[in-house]
Image (cartoon, rainbow, N blue to C red):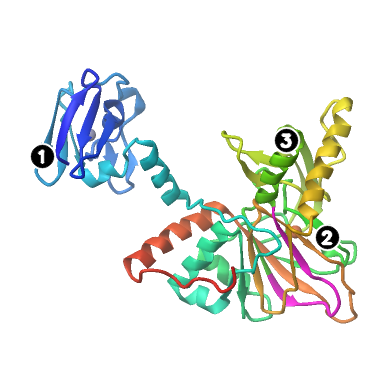
């Protein structure tokens, strides 16, 4: 820091940096984020200052630079706060600085793709063993939305190991992990040998699982190919081509239901927008599963046909050959993908006699995956420069 100056009636401090640039810091924010042990519980790095003690109009009584590149502020009640230059600079309020910080925190740069995608691949055992490989796995999972881990043992258990690598898996009514195979009296359409149209998993839950893990234990001799589509990419294309359809799918609350018995008995019901958008109108999550879309449709009768027309338009765009990647999992493959972004499907297969096609599946939440990604990034940055790039892409 070169200089600190009180402006706006001392309700804001302006800091000039060594490179000549400037940052503005509102005093209410500075007071709220005092780093002293009375205002911040150091062991938790959590705010201890209650909001009722914060004066929204607070002005600095005195502000000056202190040794060790610190800004020292004294408040009207005599309380004093100190802020390190680097800490302040990382919290600059300029638009460019905020965008940089947010992308560091959420690692959101996504790469959109269509049928040309070469599935990113990494060796399963390296991801378990090596921080750089685990970092490459989760970073690519965030950016591209899919990573194929290869060479896992072709028996149940691989997903529990990946769960431990992440922290923990997401428990649902289908159990900690679940077997996708042809079952008598299937309690889910996935547990048959029929074709599964493109879908996201579990929109019947209010918080659908963020990441899905599918471990191929046995594959069908004929059929059973997997299909993947970048649903957020297709939603953006729908917005260009059929803005009315996009608007309807982003606005209509659709009922989803799932009833049955598995890990325990369940009667799940919730409402989802098929295309979830954020405050800026950007698509952030696809909630689309035709099997569990409820027969209850909570719209006025005159809105029913326009809703179906919009859904058909989206579905057709999803299935368009330029958007679909098709491949066949082999025993030992673990397909990991973003269940908020991608839709997945399966071609029908011959059930066969003994054994037959068998996948083990599990879910993880993005909170857990992104948390592990941030920790691995810091670990890799502290040691090696960069993890290996996955093959493919
Ligand atoms: Fe599925
Ligand atoms: Zn304090």
Dot 2 falls on a residue whose secondary structure is strand
Residue at image x 72%, y 33%? 247
What residue did someone put label 2 on? Answer: 196
Q: Camera-side residue: 122 or 58?
A: 122
> Disc 3 and disc 1: Cα gap in Å?
56 Å
Question: Is 224 included in the stretch rendered in magenta?
Answer: yes
Residue span colored magenta: 215-230
Q: Nearer the viewer, mark 2 or mark 3?
A: 3
Give the mark, 3 or 1, whose residue is nearer the N terminus.
Answer: 1
Residue 278 is at least partly visible in this image: yes
Find out whether residue 149 is within the magenta segment. no
Q: x%, y% of residue 256?
A: 78, 42
- Whether residue 274 is visible to the viewer of this picture, yes or no, is no
Q: Could you say which is closer to the camera, residue 50 or residue 253?
A: 253
**In percent of the image, x 85 and y 38: which residue is there?**
309
How far apart are the alpha carbons under marks 2 and 3?
28 Å
In front: label 3 or label 1: 3
Front in this rendered view, residue 345 or 363? 345
Q: Is residue 60 left or right of residue 42?
A: left
Q: Which residue is mark 3?
A: 243
Residue that extends furthest to the left in the rendered view of this protein: 67
Q: Is residue 88 left or right of residue 181?
A: left
Label 2 beta carbon less than 8 Å to ligand 1:
yes
Tell me the residue that label 1 is attached to: 66
Q: Residue at x 26, y 41 (%)?
A: 88
Q: Quadrant of the N terminus?
A: top left
Position of residue 348 relative to residue 16, above or below, is: below
Q: Residue at x 24, y 39 (%)?
A: 21
- What element does badge 1 sit on? strand
Residue 244 placed where, x, y %? 75, 33
């Amino acid at each position: 820091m070169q200089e600190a100056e009180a402006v706006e009636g001392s309700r804001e401090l302006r800091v000039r940096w060594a490179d000549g640039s400037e940052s503005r810091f509102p005093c209410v924010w500075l007071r709220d984020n005092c780093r002293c042990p009375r205002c911040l519980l150091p062991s938790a790095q959590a705010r201890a200052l209650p909001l009722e003690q914060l004066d929204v109009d607070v002005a600095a009584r005195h502000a000056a630079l202190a040794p060790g590149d610190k800004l020292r502020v004294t408040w009207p009640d005599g309380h004093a706060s100190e802020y390190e230059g680097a800490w302040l600079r990382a919290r600059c309020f300029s638009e460019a600085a905020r965008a940089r910080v947010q992308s560091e925190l959420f690692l959101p740069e996504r790469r959109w793709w269509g049928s040309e995608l070469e599935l990113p691949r990494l060796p399963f055992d390296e991801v378990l063993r090596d921080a750089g490989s685990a970092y490459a796995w989760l970073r690519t999972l965030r950016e591209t939305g899919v990573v194929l881990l290869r060479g896992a043992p072709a028996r149940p258990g691989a997903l529990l190991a990946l769960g431990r690598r992440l922290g923990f898996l997401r428990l649902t009514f289908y159990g900690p992990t679940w077997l996708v195979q042809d079952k008598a009296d299937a309690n889910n359409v996935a547990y048959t040998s029929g074709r599964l149209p493109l879908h996201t998993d579990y929109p019947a839950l209010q918080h659908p699982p963020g990441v899905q893990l599918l471990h191929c234990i046995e594959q069908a001799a004929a059929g059973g190919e997997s299909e993947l589509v970048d649903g957020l990419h297709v939603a953006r294309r729908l917005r260009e081509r059929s803005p009315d359809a996009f608007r309807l799918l982003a606005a209509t609350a659709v009922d989803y239901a799932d009833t049955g018995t598995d890990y325990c008995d369940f009667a799940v019901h919730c409402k989802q927008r098929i295309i979830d958008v954020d405050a800026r109108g950007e698509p952030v999550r696809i909630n689309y599963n035709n099997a569990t879309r409820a027969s209850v449709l909570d719209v006025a009768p005159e809105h029913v046909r326009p809703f179906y027309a919009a859904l058909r338009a989206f579905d057709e765009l999803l299935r368009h050959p330029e958007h679909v990647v098709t491949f066949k999992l082999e025993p030992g493959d673990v397909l990991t993908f973003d269940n908020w972004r991608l839709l997945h499907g399966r071609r029908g297969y011959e059930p066969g006699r003994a054994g037959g096609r068998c996948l083990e599946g599990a879910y993880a939440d993005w909170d857990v995956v992104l948390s592990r990604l941030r920790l691995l990034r810091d670990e890799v940055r502290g040691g090696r420069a960069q993890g290996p790039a996955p093959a493919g892409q």
